[in-house]
Structures are given as C-alpha cells and as structure tokens.
Image (spheres, rainbow, N blue to C red):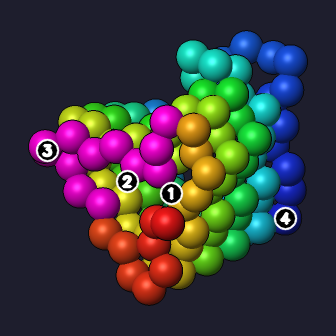
Amino acid sequence: MLNCMLDNDGCRGSVARLSGSSAQGRWDQVEICGAERQNCALSLEGGASVELHKCRIWKNHGDGVLCSDKSSVKMHGCVVKANDGIGVCLKDESRCEALNSNFFSNKKGNNRVDKTSSMMYNEEGAE
C-alpha cells in the first residue's frame, strides 16, 4: 500500500486488520486514524506481518497497533502518537522492531509488551 489515508472515524471496529500467516505486506507513507475506543488502528493476529515505512498512526480512540498470536510489525521512520490507548501492544509471542521511529503522547503508554513478546528499538525509540 502506498501513500494513502485509512480513516475509520465514525465506524465500528479497527481501521485495518491483518489475520493469518499469509497476511503480509509493506505499507509506505500510510496514515491510520479514527479507530473507536475498544479497537485499534492496526490489528495483526495469527502470524500476520507488515513492514511500515514513514507511516503515521495517530488520533485513534483506542490503541495504535495491536500484535497478537505470533504476529509482527517492523517500523521504519514511523510515528505513533496521540492515541487514547497504548501506542503499541504486543502479546502472545509477537514482536515489533522499530527503526528510527517515534512513540509519544499515547494516553495509556507508548508500549505494553507481555512476557512472551519482544520490542526492539534502533535509534530514536520511545520518549
């Protein structure tokens, strides 16, 4: 996906959801906003994986990114900010690699990682 805006304002559910190990991709300059409270901007589950380049995940009423059930996200030069929930939430053996990305001003924290998951920062990282 290249140079687009995904805005779910006023609709139910997460803005984008990837599920299953065959759900993979690379997104460049994508803006994701407008998720409602009990959902998130980007939800990955069941081994899904995505690589984000210069993306902005912000102004969601829930979490920014949720990875569960062995899913993964790799961020290059991304910004995760101003979400009402958590910036990035990892659980159930999921992982996030954040390269030159920033996480700030997320109301419930910039990240939450359970014991089975991992988050790696390179360069700037969370503030």
Highlighted magenta segment, given as a residue range: 108-119
The crowd level at tag 2 (other Cα within 10 Å; few <14, some 14-19, many 20+) is: many
Q: Is residue 70 left or right of residue 105?
A: left
| Residue 5 spot, x, y in % from top left | 85, 50
Name the residue tied to disc 1.
50
Q: Quadrant of residue 14?
A: top right
Which is more N-terminal, label 2 or label 1?
1
What secondary structure is marked by label 3?
Answer: loop
Q: Amino acid at mark 4?
A: Asn
Q: Nearer the viewer, residue 94 or 62?
A: 62
Q: Nearer the viewer, residue 67 or 59?
A: 59
Name the residue tied to disc 4.
3
What secondary structure is marked by label 4?
Answer: strand
Q: Quadrant of residue 61?
A: top right
Q: Separation of disc 1 and disc 2 at Cα?
A: 7 Å
Query: Between tags 3 and 2, which lies in front?
Result: 3
What secondary structure is marked by label 1?
Answer: strand
The crowd level at tag 4 (other Cα within 10 Å; few <14, some 14-19, many 20+) is: few
Name the residue tied to disc 2.
72
Q: Is residue 94 left or right of residue 2?
A: left
Which is more N-terminal, label 1 or label 4?
4
Q: Residue at x 49, y 66 (%)?
A: 127
Mark number, residue 116: 3
Q: Separation of disc 3 and disc 2 at Cα?
A: 13 Å
Which is more N-terminal, label 3 or label 4?
4
Q: Separation of disc 4 and disc 1 at Cα?
A: 15 Å
